[in-house]
Image (spheres, grey):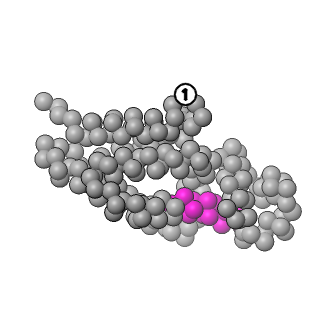
Amino acid sequence: MNKKQELLKKISDLFAKKGYEKTSIRDIAAHLGMTNAGLYYYFRNKQEMLIDIMNYGIEDALLTMRRELPHIKSAEDKIAWIIRAQIKFYSENKSQTKASIHERGALEAKYAKIIGEKERKYVDFIKQVVGQIIQENPHISISVEVATFCLLGMLNWLVHWYNPGGKVSPDELASNITNIFLKGLKGRSD
C-alpha cells in the first residue's frame, strides 16, 4: 500500500464516522497529523479524496472480476464467488465501503458520471451471471434486473449491520447470502 492509499484509508474512516459534508479539510489534516499544505500535496480538494476512495473500490472489484470470473465454470459458482469477494472487500475496507455507499450523492456531476459508468460495468458483470442462471432454469420468472438489484441490495446493506469481527465470519455470511439468493431465485412458488 502506497502513502496515498494509506491516507485514503484514514480519510475514509473520517468520512464514514462524521460524513463527507461535515468533515472539513482542517479535520482531515488534523486526523492525518498533517498540515493543510501537506494534504494538498496528495489531493487537490476534498472531492478528489472522495472520488479516489470510491474509485479504488470499484476499480479493484472490476479488475478482480475480469481476472477471476472467466476461470469459474458454473454461473452459481460465479455468484458465490462474487458474493464472497464483495464481503471480503467490505470486511477489509469497512470505512471505505461505507463512505462509498453513503456519500455517493456528495459527488460533483463530473465525478458522479465517472463512478456511475464504472458501477454500470460492475452491475453488468453481475447481470450476465444472474441472466445465465435464469436461462439455465426455465421455471424462473424473475427479471434479471430485479434479481441483480436484490442481490446488490443485500450486499450493500451490510454496511448498516454487519460486523466482520462479530459472531458470523465473512465466509459464513457469504455462504448464507449465497444460499438465500440462489434458493430464492430458483425456488418455485407453486
Q: x%, y% of residue 51?
A: 60, 63
Which residue: 13% across, 42% down? Answer: 139
184 versus 43 height, above or below: above
* Image quarter in which the N terminus is found: bottom right
Residue 102 seen from this side:
no
182 versus 11 height, above or below: above
Give left or right: position of 136 versus 41.
Answer: left
Q: x%, y% of residue 162?
A: 54, 35
Residue 79 seen from this side:
yes
How many discs appear? 1
Give left or right: position of 171 versus 69.
Answer: right
Label 1 Cα crowd, 10 Å radius (few <14 / some 14-19 / many 20+): few
Q: Amino acid at mark 1?
A: Lys
- Whether residue 50 is in magenta: the answer is yes
Which residue: 34% across, 61% down? Answer: 71
Residue ID for mark 1: 167
Q: Main secondary structure of the magenta part?
A: helix
* Image quarter in which the C terminus is found: top left
Identify the element where label 1 is drawn. Answer: loop
Q: Nearer the viewer, residue 67 or 12?
A: 67
Q: x%, y% of residue 36?
A: 84, 64
Q: x%, y% of residue 100?
A: 57, 53
- Whether residue 40 is in magenta: the answer is no
Give left or right: position of 125 versus 54.
Answer: left
Give left or right: position of 189 versus 169.
Answer: left
Span highlighted in magenta in the image = 45-58
